[in-house]
Amino acid sequence: MLHTSDATAMLRKCTHTGIIAIIFTVLLPLLQFFHDSLLYYRHAIVAGEYWRFWSGSLVHTNHWHLLLNLAGLWLLTFIAPLPFRTHTQLLQIGWLALCVGAGLWWFSPAVIWYAGFSGILYGLFMLGGLHRLQQRDWLTATLILVGICGKTGWDWWLGGESASANLIEAPVIYAAHIYGMTGALFLSIFTRWQGITKP
């Protein structure tokens, strides 16, 4: 049984990630109105529209794509809320979006366009899973880390043509998930090192 102080701390952590979920539940549908100006599009980036490195992760191919990612964000809120303040989580999301965009640019030149929050979402789940690992919550950590890595491996095996690809009317760009998870891994290492070296 959790002590009152433990339950309060858990609720506080859930609240910060819950605020993030509320922000993006409102923001992402609104950004759909600017879809063509925001999606990651290689030729437009070459022309100088560098914001697409970040904004491509904030628009979606259709409403099912949007709903799937929002559902994932709310799932994260309840099973693995991140132990960071709201503004810190916003900065982390900005970093993960950059990792997805830069990863696609440098390592996936065949990807001409990309849209979707899932690269960021996989990164957030990676952060949540690694935090649970540090807290010795072995079961939750295993379920999260094996789940996201297994799903990414499955999408790779199918070449991006999974059942979810039919739903979102586009191939699953599993590389974006890998870049998001890699960005989260570096972020977790940095956060851990910062905590160790802080006087």
Image (cartoon, rainbow, N blue to C red):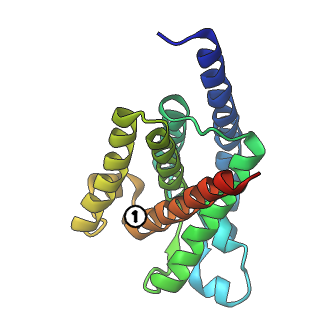
Secondary structure beneath label 1? loop
Toward the left, the furthest residue is: 157
What kind of residue is marked 1? Ala
- In the rendered image, which quarter is residue 52 located in? bottom right
Q: Is residue 107 visible?
A: yes
Rendered view: 190 above or below 128? below
Q: Which residue was labeled with disc 1?
A: 170
Rendered view: 183 above or below 52? above
- In the rendered image, which quarter is residue 37 located in? bottom right
Left or right, 144 with reference to 47: left
Mark count = 1
Question: x, y percentage for residue 67?
Answer: 50, 42
26, 179: nearer the viewer? 179
Residue beneath the point at 55% across and 68% down: 100
107, 131: nearer the viewer? 131
Left or right, 118 with reference to 51: left
Toward the front, the furthest residue is: 199
Question: x, y percentage for residue 50?
Answer: 72, 79
Q: Local crowd at mark 1 within 10 Å, few (<14), some, or many (≥20)?
A: some
Q: Is residue 32 visible?
A: no
25, 177: nearer the viewer? 177
Rendered view: 92 above or below 113? above
Question: x, y percentage for residue 25?
Answer: 64, 39
Question: x, y percentage for residue 170?
Answer: 40, 64
Left or right, 159 with reference to 106: left
Residue beneath the point at 66% across and 44% down: 24
